[in-house]
Amino acid sequence: DIVMTQSPDSLAVSLGERATIYCKSSQSVLYSSNYKNYLAWYQQKPGQPPKLLMYWASTRQSGVPDRFSGGGSGTDFTLTISSLQAEDVAVYYCQQYYDTPLTFGGGTKVEIQ
Amino acid sequence: EVQQLESGGGLVQPGGSLRLSCAASGFTFSDYAMSWVRQAPGKGLEWVSSIGGSGGSTFYADSVKGRFTISRDNSKNTLYLQMNSLRAEDTAVYYCAKDPRPNYCSSGVCYSFFDYWGQGTLVTVSS
């Protein structure tokens, strides 16, 4: 199984400041035939289902604000919120879809400092 | 507007059974792979099972293989999860989730990510 490890577990950032979340996979999720990273990011607010933010590691889902960006390749990925807003308080998860079982990271809780 | 409404959760004793349903609307249901993802109270997300659009291919996490069965009725736009031999560790909110790629994994392996999720249904396994 591909193990997804997120860091940090929690992050407190001031409003308007940058927040960066890290996700590391135990093996590469870059598919060599199409050079795509099979990595997605989700945001989950309390009492709500997850919401897709990014797929193919860096493609923003329709409607997601451009302050969210995804980066990285192979085994190391980042989700960056360039200017944290109050509505961004949530838990963020990465997920690999390179192989089954599909696996998620443990989550990173983002709070306002 | 895409909607996915889960039902069928509740309290069940260890060893019991439940069938979850997910009624979908707002998209051509048969064109999309669907999955079940669960979340234990206060914990992270765990993929449970996926099914291709035609229903011909199904995949399971090892933790549920042999106990859970995923199926779909495309004439009713409904996804199901039959859960047997339930254990305390199956206690979770169960979400149905849709893959965004039409006609993906109709017969092959489903390596899915998820663009729409239902609100979830809580399954509690306890005596």
Image: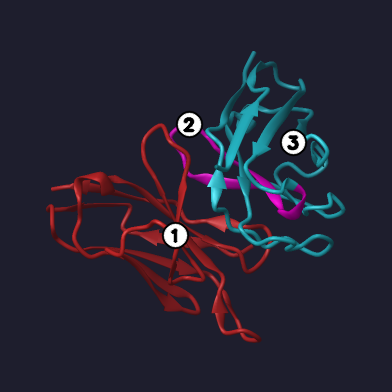
Chain colours: A red, B cyan
* Residue B59 to residue A29: above or below: above
Q: Which residue is mark 3?
A: B78
- The x and y percentages for residue B27 are 65, 47
Q: Is residue B36 magenta?
A: yes
- Kindly indicate whether the residue at mark 1 contacts the one at mark 2 (C-beta within 8 angstroms): no
Instruction: Name the amino acid type tagged 1.
Output: Ser
If the image is split into quadrants, where does the N terminus of chain A sit?
Answer: bottom right
For the image, the number of numbered tags is 3
Name the spot of residue B49 as percent of width and height, x first: 71, 47
Front residue of A103/A69: it is: A69
Q: Amino acid at mark 3?
A: Thr
Residue at image coords 62%, 84% = A34
Q: Chain of mark 1?
A: A
Toward the right, the furthest residue is B56
Amino acid at circle 2 = Pro
Question: Depth-wise, is mark 2 or mark 1 nearer the camera?
Answer: 1
Q: Which circle's residue, 3 or 2, is located before the other in the chain?
A: 2
- Residue placed at 77% from the left, 23% from the top? B17
Residue density around tag 1, few if under 14, some if 14–19, many if 20 or more, within 10 Å: few
Is B79 above or below relative to B116?
above
Horizontal side of residue A10 vs A106, given as left or right: left
Check the image and report above or below for B49 versus A68: above
User: Where's residue B118, x and y in %?
Assistant: 56, 37
| Secondary structure beneath label 1 | loop
Q: Nearer the viewer, residue A29 or B103?
A: B103
Q: Residues within 10 Å of mark 3 (few under 14, many from 20)?
A: many
Q: Nearer the viewer, mark 3 or mark 2?
A: 3
Label 3: chain? Answer: B
Query: Does the magenta portion include B94?
Result: no
Extent of the magenta region: B30-48
Residue labelled with disc 1: A62
Question: For mark 2, what is the residue?
Answer: B41
